[in-house]
Every structure is written in C-alpha cells, then in structure tokens.
Amino acid sequence: MDTAVVVIGEALVDIVDGPDGRTEHPGGSPMNVAVGLARLDVPTRLVCALGDDEPGAAIRAHVGASGVVVDATTIDRTSTAAATIDERGRATYEFDLDWRLAPVEVPPGTPLVHVGSIGAVLAPGADTVLDAVRRRPAGALFSLDPNVRPSITPSRDDVLATLKPLFEAADVVKLSDEDAAWLWPDRDIDAVLDGLLAAGAGLAAVTLGGEGCAIASRNARRRLRAPTVDVADTIGAGDSFMSGLLTGVLASEDDPGDLDDASLERVTRFALACAAISVSRLGADPPGRSEVGR
C-alpha cells in the first residue's frame, strides 16, 4: 500500500478520573483508529484540529510514535474529554471541543477514507468532513463509525439527518450496541444491520461489548463472541475493533460487501482480538500486529 489511509476527525486529550486517581493521555475516536491502523502496519494520515499548546504537542508526539502523519488545522486550544471510569471499566465523558477544519484534499490512490464520532456530526467541521467524503478519489473505500455522543449532539433527529448522507456513501459501517440503541431504539441488532445494508453499506458491524459482535456483508452474516480477558477499561475498545476490521478489509482486497462467510469470520476475529488486547490495558492503547498474532 503506497498511499496512506486518510482518517478525518477529532484528536483530543482524555482526562481520566479512575480508581487510582487522574491521568491524562491523547484520545479521540478517529485519532485512536489512526494509531490502531498504523500499529497494524497500515500507513495512515490523520486530519484533525489541534492547538499550538502542550496538549497538542502531546497528541502529535503520541501519534507520531506510531508512525501516523498528522495534518492539523490550528485552533485556539486543543480539545479535551473528561472521562470517569465506573467499577465495570465503562467510561462516561464530558467534552470541551472546538471542531473547525480546513478543506481536506484526499490524494489519488488513497485506499480508504475513515471518519466518525464527533467529527462526523459537529458543526462547523462536519460540513468539511462530508465534502471530503463526497470528493474522495474514485476507488477509495469509505468507512464510518458514528460513535454517538448525546452529551455533545443531543438531538437524535439532527444526528440522523447529518449521518444520512454518510451512511449512504459508506462501504463499511461500525457501531456499538449503545450507538444502535440510541439511534434506532425501536430496532433489534439484526434490524440495525439490515437497515445499514439497505442504506448502502457493503459491510456493517455492531459491537456487543464482552459478548463480541454481530456483522453482516451482502453475502454473509455472523455473530461472534469476544475473547475472554481481564478488563482494565473500555476506552478505545471500539476504535481498536475498527482498526482491526479495516486492516482485514484492506488485506482481503475484496469489495467489503462481497466477503463470504469464511472471509467475514476471519476479518472479524482479527478485529475482536485487537479490541480484546486494548481493553486488557489502561487507556486507548491499541495493539501492534505482532501482539495480535500471538
């Protein structure tokens, strides 16, 4: 793969209040996906917005250490997310965000454009994201992880309206079961997958926490359990799954919608292994390829 995958979305600093006190580390769903891809040996460029400040420098150093190339619009201060971890390792967030983005040029030959989370729906940057998706080069796959944040965008109708053209353009869509329940409270998991495929996705997945995931292409559908691990926290688990899933899709060289039962299971088990390793350690710390191999 000569040209990098392009990931567009927020990069911020997670401020985590947990049982052992407060810690700060780089975060943001798209940033985590970019790092996860790079650690799995997928060349990756992260398009984001950062302040010229100490948190912004920490993010640049963090993603750079994994080989991610950063293309950042300069903003007044780097965004933050204050996370509180409960006794089950689940995180809840409060955000301080500034999401503005300069126009994004996706180079010819780019194999994949990935967007998601706050960056896909929060104005004014969401308009720039949609424009980049629509103008991506022919042949570039597009993947989407809504990773909804009702505390930032509380109107379900507005979020669905903003996501609609992205769902229609997407080749791969991944959501958590919590995302699915908030977006479509009247649908079960299979109905959510059916709706995503009907909207245009070739491959759709819903992660189910420790229960694994449900995933469907146009040719196959599976529900697979997650590996059993001791959970440190769940920050970045879905992002690690997304990185693993996209790595598997790119390696298959098939249209995501054409994955058959065996191929679907192979890429999904790889993604679940990535997520399992991530939740076994503190913070969003996706694995390298050699770790997943073990």
Image (cartoon, grey):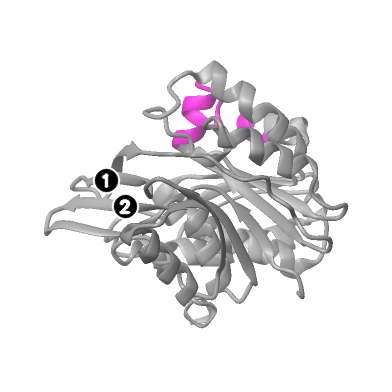
Dot 2, how many residues are within 10 Å of its Cα: few (below 14), some (14-19), or many (20+)? many
Circle 1: residue type = Ala
Q: Nearer the viewer, residue 271 or 14?
A: 14
Queried whether the magenta region covers residue 108, the answer comes back as no
Q: Quadrant of residue 109?
A: bottom right
Q: Does any portion of residue 225 appear in the rendered image?
A: no
Instruction: Indicate the quadrant containing the N terminus: top left, top right, bottom left or bottom right.
Output: bottom right
Q: Residue 204: image x %, image y %?
A: 66, 44
* Residue beneath disc 2: 14
Query: For the magenta stretch, what is the residue range?
Result: 178-194
Q: Secondary structure at mark 1?
A: strand
| Picture layout, residue 279 above or below residue 251 | above
On whether residue 192 falls in the magenta region, the answer is yes
- Identified at 53% across, 26% down, the residue is 183
Residue indicated by mark 1:
83
Residue 267 lies, in percent from the top left, at 65, 63
* Labels 2 and 1 touching (C-beta < 8 A): yes
Quarter-of-image position of residue 246: bottom right
Residue 114 visible from this viewpoint:
yes
Q: On the rendered structure, is 103 left or right of 23?
A: right
Q: Amino acid at mark 2?
A: Asp
Q: Is residue 254 left or right of residue 268?
A: right
